[in-house]
Image (spheres, helix red, strand yellow):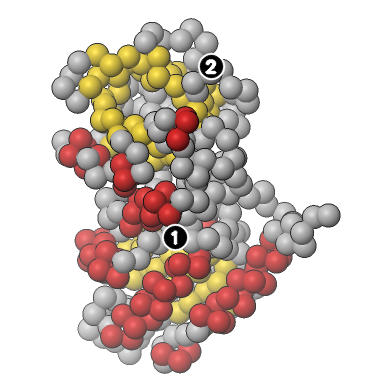
Amino acid sequence: MSIHAQDTFPDLIALDHAGRSRSLSELAAGDPLVLTTFRGFWCPKEQAFMRRLVAFQDEAEVAYTSVVSLSVDPVEVTAAFRAGLGARWTFLADPEREHLDALDLREHTDTVHHPYRPAVFVLTPDLVVHSAYNGYWYWGRPGLDELRADLREVTRAIRADWNVPA
Amino acid sequence: MSERCWLALASEAPPTADAAARLRSADGEPAGWLAAWLRASKPVREARRADPRIIDSDGAAAAISLILPDRAALPIFDDPAVQGARRAVLADPEPADLVTTLLIDASHFAGSLTARRGPDALARLRDDPFRHVSAATLLFVDPALLGRVAPPPGPVIERHGSDVPWPGGRFPAL
């Protein structure tokens, strides 16, 4: 499958950075969800983008927005990468590449690591795709202002009291 | 499950409690009981509210870090020290079996309860991030009271409503 806006993202289950089985819907926890797939800890482009997300988490932490990052890195590597970044969101590990092809997110041009193609999805709490970004080229990824705009639209749509009650 | 969970220390198992378990000090000495009530109204004067998901009558014994600041000197929930502790909980690469903040009203941090299991549980609890807010007591709790709760997804540190103990709760769906 190829995932586009208005699709429902599969409620995949994978191990988190602590080795616990987690589902995407559980991790959304009723809030908007920013899901990123990334090649792996070794990629400079991912390191640069993750540093942006680390800055973004200072807003997400007070804005009722969950973040999840998924790669083929093993659990231990995922945990180390997350800790090194100072990230406070959940990282998921898919070293067996169980979801790679089902999501149509295999980066076919990398025949060494067989990683996820970098992508960013802004999802509603019930995993409907509001926006999808193809990050194969770095500038295909959303800037923080684009994420803010997407999350404003999603939050407006899901919060009954967006317009302050009289 | 009731919408609210109340916790309190007691010298004996309260007959009205929905669950209770004996406590032992880190040295193994008897330290009373930890009791839980699942109900809307406050069951006893000293009870503080917790995330209802922590209660599990099938839960195994655990080591806990219990923080109960003096009611006369509670920091506000938005105190930078309390915010920082919540960030540290989320950053922990080895999440606890459960963590809940405690509330007595909508604006103050009235403590926290963190549980871990395993051979290094007590050692890990000595690094409870909330100990920077107020003194922590390390205890062992018997089975049939505390379960395991999946770690919060992060990075949200805010409560989902001022009367909801972090990290539990969610806003109603439209």
Q: Amino acid at mark 2?
A: Val
Q: Residue at x 40, y 33 (%)?
A: B69
Residue A161, position as x, y percentages in the image: 74, 57
Res B44 label: 2
Res A128 label: none
Query: Looking at the rendering, which quadrant does residue B61 occupy?
Result: top left
Residue B37, position as x, y percentages in the image: 52, 21
- The chain containing the residue under callout 2 comes to B
Quarter that holds the C terminus of chain B: bottom right
Front-most of residues A135 and B35: B35
Q: Tally the numbered discs.
A: 2
Is A65 rendered above or below residue B149? below
Residue wearing tag 1: B155
Is A94 rendered above or below residue B8? below
- Badges 1 and 2: C-beta atoms under 8 Å apart? no
Is A94 rendered above or below residue B28? below
Q: Residue at x 52, y 74 (%)?
A: A121
Q: Residue at x 42, y 49 (%)?
A: B82
- The chain containing the residue under callout 1 comes to B
Discs 1/2, front: 2
Query: Looking at the rendering, which quadrant does residue B123 occupy?
Result: top left
Quarter that holds the N terminus of chain B: top right
Front-most of residues A89 and B83: B83
